[in-house]
Amino acid sequence: MSRLLVYLIPLLVIVVFMLMAHFEKRLAHDPTHRGFFERNGTVLGIVFIALVAFWMLFLVVLPYLYMVQESFHPKLVAAERGGPKDMLTLEQYRSFFIQPTDGEVNTTHLWAFFFSLAVSAAVTVLNFAICYPLAYYMAQAGSVQKVRLLMLALIVPYWVNEILRAFSLRLLLASKGLINQALMGLGITDAPVDFLGSNVGLYVGLSYAYLLVMMFPLYNAVESLDKNQIEAARDLGAPWWRIHKDVVIPYAKPGIASGCTMVFMLSAGSLAAPQFLGGPKTLWFTSIVYDFFFQAFNWPRGAAYAFLLLAGCIALVMLMLRLFKVSLGETIR
Amino acid sequence: MSSRAIIKVMIGFYVVLFFAYLFGPLLVMSITAFNTPSYPSAYPFEGFTLDWFVKLWNHRAMMEGLVNSVIIGIGVICVSVPVGLAAAIVMNQIYYRARSLYYLVTVSPVLTPGVIIGISTVIFWRDFSELTGTRPLLYKGIVLSIFGQASFIAAYCLLIIMARLQRFDRAQEEAALDLGASYPQVFWHILLPFLRPALISAAVIAFLSSFENYNTTTFAILADKTLVTVLAGEVRQGTTPALSALAVIIITISLLGAIAYEVMKRREERQSARIAERAKLAERGELAPGDAAPAPA
């Protein structure tokens, strides 16, 4: 039953979409007055539609809906699926709040959820602070060649994959790592500082992983600002911080919002940094999801948690966008 | 004046610090690849060795993973570039609210955490392949990884292709149609060649993002392995300088690529400067106008 619904929902959306496209075509003034199939030829038109439909249905929408559907089912072995035990239940979501084993409040998972979102938000702010000056510098001060070189220098480290980057940070921050060696060699500390255990590694790893994701939207946003505006503000006697507060930042707000949204979503969903740079006591929400899949083999509960993560992130991003008065449309442009 | 100088120094200091943060860890890791101790360490430097590169070459799981990664990467290109192209063309031909709805849905996979894409892909294809009896054909790590990765990489391709498509002059299409071309001919002989640079860069980006993806692949790959999931396993178990050796190889390749790109760009710039110069001369009638062909875009 619930699986039928999974197939019906996209069908409904497609119908609505077709109607929208159809009626808006009438409103629009296309000088050539051609329909989609006429403009592309029937065969190519069908190929295009089929490709997009395959992508949207089989790679995006149906998998998402299936995941949601799975999260409302109990954990069953393959043989029992579709049998009498396979009914809809809220058990998986309940277990996020209340431990099924002892009936207590599930503080571990609730804490992990808030911890992940809070750390992701903190990393977003940190990355904004790190990237904004360079983005501004590149956008306003550099010659074309200089900017291109800086861009290349930014991109090159990111061809090295996520795992190796985490590995390299671990080499630096481990108790026998270079930073601790330096600190002890200079006599600043006697015993190695536990950077990984105290989550410093986690923050650094997340911030390092998503620097670029913040940098490019910021750069693009600031770059299109007319330099004369800054010059004018300066001529009117504005100090540098007012120029940023009243001219640059309001202008670049959509870019800032999209950079922040991306960094936040990516760090909340990241797996590598918490796995390899988090301390032994760090519980990251995606790591919990990972464990449900690979250790407990409890896929429905993992799916429920994944869905909660997605819902939590989207809710927070929407709230922030509302708070800073940026529309979603501007962000994803 | 002096405050200007202070600001300049501060900016310089900040830029240096920024790039030290970016390159420092990689530099330290690279040093460990050439140091003899079996635990990766940069200091003290106990002796130069290339053993770790040999060890890397003989690491069977990693080589197996590498082959799978390449297969998946090619698969992702084959799925996501055509899909991205089709999606860009469709996007170009719809209007207003339908368009923004379409955009929102197609770009949403980019913002979805990779973990969720991986999980949902596995769950969907487990049930769907069972339902249609295609389980032995489709429910495989490599196939699922291609599907999972393509779901969001196709959106990257869409954005890249879209950016170029928006500069397409529809008068060209009209002209071809007036000259008696059929629609498929317009597509093959006019639109596709125009989009070729975008298609190539979409393919490159698709391959690279597929190659280094971890969050989605670690779920979708099931019992198989890719280079990145093997690496993750290695890092989890503890570490060897062989990983640093791999990083050195990757860094070297990307640096070479970056240098080649820069050289190419500079040559292009010189060329277009020369062409502009010649155009100016031609305007004054000192050269035949035919010589002043515009630079290929």
Image: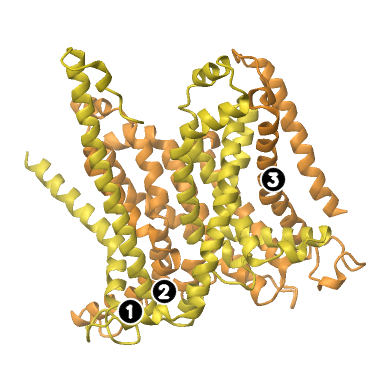
Chain colours: A orange, B yellow
Residue A63, quarter of the rendered image: bottom right
Q: Is residue B62 above or below residue A248?
A: below
**Residue A38 appears in view:** yes
Residue B113 placed where, x, y %?
57, 56
User: Closest to the observer: B280 or B139?
Assistant: B280
Q: Amino acid at mark 2?
A: Ser
Q: Chain of mark 1?
A: A
Marks 3 and 1 share the same chain? yes
- Do callouts 2 and 1 mark residues in contact (Cβ within 8 Å)? yes
Q: Residues under labels 3 and 2: Cα distance?
A: 46 Å
Label 2 secondary element: loop
Q: Is residue A211 left or right of residue B217?
A: left
Q: In the shown orientation, is residue A109 left or right of residue B8?
A: right
SS class, disc 1: loop
Q: In the rendered structure, the residue with mark 3 lies on which chain?
A: A
Residue under numbered circle 1:
A193
Residue A281 seen = no
The circle drawn on residue B113 is none
Q: Which residue is mark 3?
A: A54
Question: Of discs 3 and 1, which sits in the foreground?
Answer: 3
Name the residue carrying label 2: A198
Mark 2 packing: few (<14 Cα in 10 Å), some, or many (20+)? Answer: some
Q: CA distance from mark 3 to mark 1?
A: 52 Å
